């Protein structure tokens, strides 16, 4: 009897998405993720990580502009 592939949790999905933002992955990690990640969870995690990235960039720019304006 074969076991069904175990589904990755939220943290594993976020880790895979963040590594993909960085652009560096080992082949074995990619193969493991391909079998365990839920595509809908990957899309949600990607949108969430992208939104956080944009918000952080906006805050950094506002801080720099505010400091330079003094």
Image: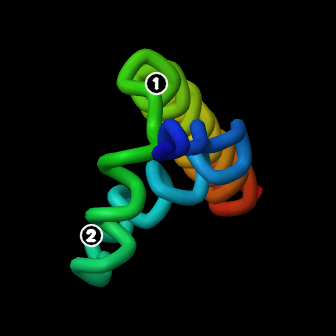
Residue at position x 40%, y 23% in the image? 43
Of residues 1 and 12, the one drawn nearer to the viewer in this rendering: 1
Residue at position x 54%, y 31% in the image? 45
x then y, percent, for residue 60? 63, 53
Mark 2 vs mark 1, CA separation in Å:
16 Å
Camera sees residue 58? no
Q: How is the image coloured?
A: rainbow
Tell me if residue 34 comes above or below residue 49 in the rendering: below
Of residues 63 and 34, the one drawn nearer to the viewer in this rendering: 34
Q: Please tell me how crowded label 2 is: few (under 14), some (14-19), or many (20+) other residues with Cα within 10 Å.
A: few
Tell me if residue 32 comes above or below residue 46 in the rendering: below
**Quadrant of the snapshot with the C terminus:** bottom right
Of residues 59 and 12, the one drawn nearer to the viewer in this rendering: 12
Helix, strand or loop at disc 1?
Answer: helix
Disc ID at residue 7: none
x then y, percent, for residue 62? 64, 42
Residue at position x 43%, y 65% in the image? 19
Helix, strand or loop at disc 2?
Answer: loop
Camera sees residue 34? yes
Residue denoted by label 2: 23
**Is 26 left or right of 16, judged from the image as shown?**
left
Residue denoted by label 1: 47
x then y, percent, for residue 10? 70, 37
């Amino acid at each position: 009897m074969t076991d069904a592939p175990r589904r990755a949790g939220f943290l594993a999905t976020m880790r895979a998405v963040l590594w993909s933002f960085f652009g560096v992955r080992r082949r074995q990690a990619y193969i493991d993720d391909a079998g365990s990640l839920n595509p809908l969870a990957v899309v949600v995690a990607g949108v969430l990580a992208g939104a956080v990235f944009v918000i952080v960039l906006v805050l950094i720019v506002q801080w720099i502009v505010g400091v330079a304006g003094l």
